[in-house]
């Protein structure tokens, strides 16, 4: 199939040039997904989808346009190219639009060492159903669980190929396997729910369905009897399940699009302290069996390991070619795209320096405060970094978990919050964002 996808992208480029494009790039994605949901021991829903999607970007001078389709007949390719060229001629000029120079593109496109695709056979619907049933049964058997809201198992695989008139040509395959469970405990107004979901590239790396079901149940039962905490200013410990959201806000703030627009609370912070001096944030796109690994970006540039934040100081923006040109810089090879849109900057595998203490040790040290295990909603001011979110978790008193809490709001300023981070040592290494539990000082809590 990889050969067929390569042929498709080359046929799109040929059609674009015949239609009058001065430059073009093309993308083809062959995807398969299968998901199974069960409820009360029986199949509730089964879905399967598969197909090929294609996308074409054409450039005429500094004008560009993108078109996409799921029909790969030759006549469709011709129509796509003609429409794209017509659209590009009418588009406004963008001085930053353009393909990579041939000297910039990589020829190292063999991603086999990254182990992004499980070579074993696709799991059957029966196998996925059995996984979901086992997870559901484990959750339902846990004392205190009143019902299992859902249990699911899924598999996905896709092959991607990209070609461009500057000479770039390359592709890769990815797969993933997932099991998730949502459990419910309690009744009426005292009802609580929580979940556990795990995903891996290789099915053999997944935790057992029983472990996933029991974890969902245990988390749910722990939430019973939740109440509002007292309003005040307290230290807050972001559990590893949700701590990566804080780093996600930092990544959004150093994204080239936000910087180029001047719409970032870190827009003037290059070289300044944004994390404690003991912490660094490293992007490494070459980690085996990590979901965001890649040898090249969506513009054909070779990716590399580099520091986004080094010893607490902001060291790099996240850039594609267009945002780099706007800022007078070089691309950091962070371009990402789908078939229907031009490239835009996006970060991949990132890891934050881990600490030398466990989450429990940080709980003991924080004294009185909030352990946050889930959040809802978000009010983030992208230009000031003002932060407010609904939260739930557990109240900590004298260094010990006292009772579950819900229906509260936490608030602070991201620039100030991130400079107080104290990391635990519990990050999960297979994730694309390897971030441990994080203790943050001096946030405001709105409860009773």
Image (cartoon, rainbow, N blue to C red):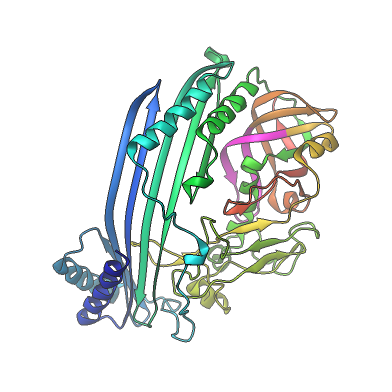
* Quarter of the image where one finds residue 365: top right
The quadrant of the image that shows the N terminus is: bottom left
Figure label count = 0
Magenta residues (range) = 371-391
- The residue lying toward the viewer, choosing from 272 and 448, is 272
Tell which residue pokes out farthest to the front in this image: 120
- At 78% from the left and 50% from the top, the residue drawn is 355
Establish if 126 lies above or below 294.
above
- The residue lying toward the viewer, choosing from 215 and 308, is 215
Measured as percent of width and height from the top left, residue 420 is found at 79, 50
Measured as percent of width and height from the top left, residue 320 is found at 51, 71
Measured as percent of width and height from the top left, residue 409 is found at 65, 33
- At 59% from the left and 51% from the top, the residue drawn is 430
- At 37% from the left and 50% from the top, the residue drawn is 121
Q: Is residue 266 magenta?
A: no
Left or right, 427 with reference to 155: right
* Quarter of the image where one finds residue 259: bottom right
Establish if 242 lies above or below 157.
above
Establish if 3 lies above or below 188.
below
- The residue lying toward the viewer, choosing from 401 and 275, is 401
Magenta part mainly helix, strand or loop? strand
Tell which residue pokes out farthest to the top in this image: 188
């Amino acid at each position: 199939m990889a050969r067929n996808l390569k042929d498709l992208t080359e046929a799109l480029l040929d059609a674009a040039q015949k239609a009058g494009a001065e430059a073009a790039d093309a993308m083809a994605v062959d995807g398969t997904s299968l998901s199974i949901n069960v409820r009360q021991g029986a199949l509730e829903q089964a879905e399967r989808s598969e197909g090929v999607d294609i996308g074409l970007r054409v450039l005429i001078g500094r004008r560009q346009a993108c078109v996409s389709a799921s029909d790969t007949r030759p006549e469709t390719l011709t129509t796509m190219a003609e429409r794209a060229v017509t659209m590009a001629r009418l588009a406004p000029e963008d001085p930053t639009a353009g393909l990579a120079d041939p000297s910039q593109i990589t020829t190292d496109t063999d991603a086999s060492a990254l182990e992004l695709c499980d070579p074993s056979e696709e799991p059957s619907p029966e196998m996925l159903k059995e996984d979901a049933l086992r997870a559901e049964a484990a959750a339902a058997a846990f004392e205190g669980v009143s019902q299992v809201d859902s249990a699911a198992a899924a598999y996905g695989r896709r092959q991607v190929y990209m070609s461009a008139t500057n000479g770039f040509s390359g592709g890769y395959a990815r797969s993933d396997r997932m099991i998730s469970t949502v459990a419910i405990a309690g009744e009426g107004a005292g009802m609580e729910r929580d979940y556990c979901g795990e995903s891996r590239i290789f099915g053999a790396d997944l935790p057992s369905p029983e472990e996933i079901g029991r974890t969902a149940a245990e988390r749910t039962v722990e939430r019973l009897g939740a109440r509002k905490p007292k309003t005040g200013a307290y230290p807050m410990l972001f559990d590893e399940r949700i701590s990566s959201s804080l780093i996600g806000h930092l990544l959004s703030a150093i994204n080239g699009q936000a910087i180029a627009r001047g719409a970032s609370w870190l827009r003037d912070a290059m070289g300044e302290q944004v994390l404690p001096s003991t912490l660094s944030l490293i992007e490494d796109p070459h980690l085996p069996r990590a979901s965001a690994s890649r040898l090249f970006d969506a513009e054909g540039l070779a990716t590399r390991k580099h520091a986004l934040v080094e010893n607490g100081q902001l060291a790099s923006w996240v850039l594609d070619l267009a945002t780099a040109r706007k800022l007078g810089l070089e691309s950091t090879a962070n371009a990402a795209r789908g078939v229907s849109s031009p490239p835009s900057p996006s970060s991949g595998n990132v890891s934050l320096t881990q600490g030398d203490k466990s989450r429990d040790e940080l709980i003991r040290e924080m004294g009185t405060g909030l352990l946050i295990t889930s959040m809802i909603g978000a009010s983030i001011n992208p230009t000031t970094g003002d932060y407010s979110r609904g939260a739930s978790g557990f109240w900590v008193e004298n260094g010990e978990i006292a009772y579950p809490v819900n229906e509260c709001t936490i608030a602070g300023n991201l620039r100030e919050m991130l400079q107080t981070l104290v990391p635990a040592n519990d990050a999960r290494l297979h994730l694309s964002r390897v971030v441990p539990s994080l203790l943050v000082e001096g946030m405001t809590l709105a409860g009773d």
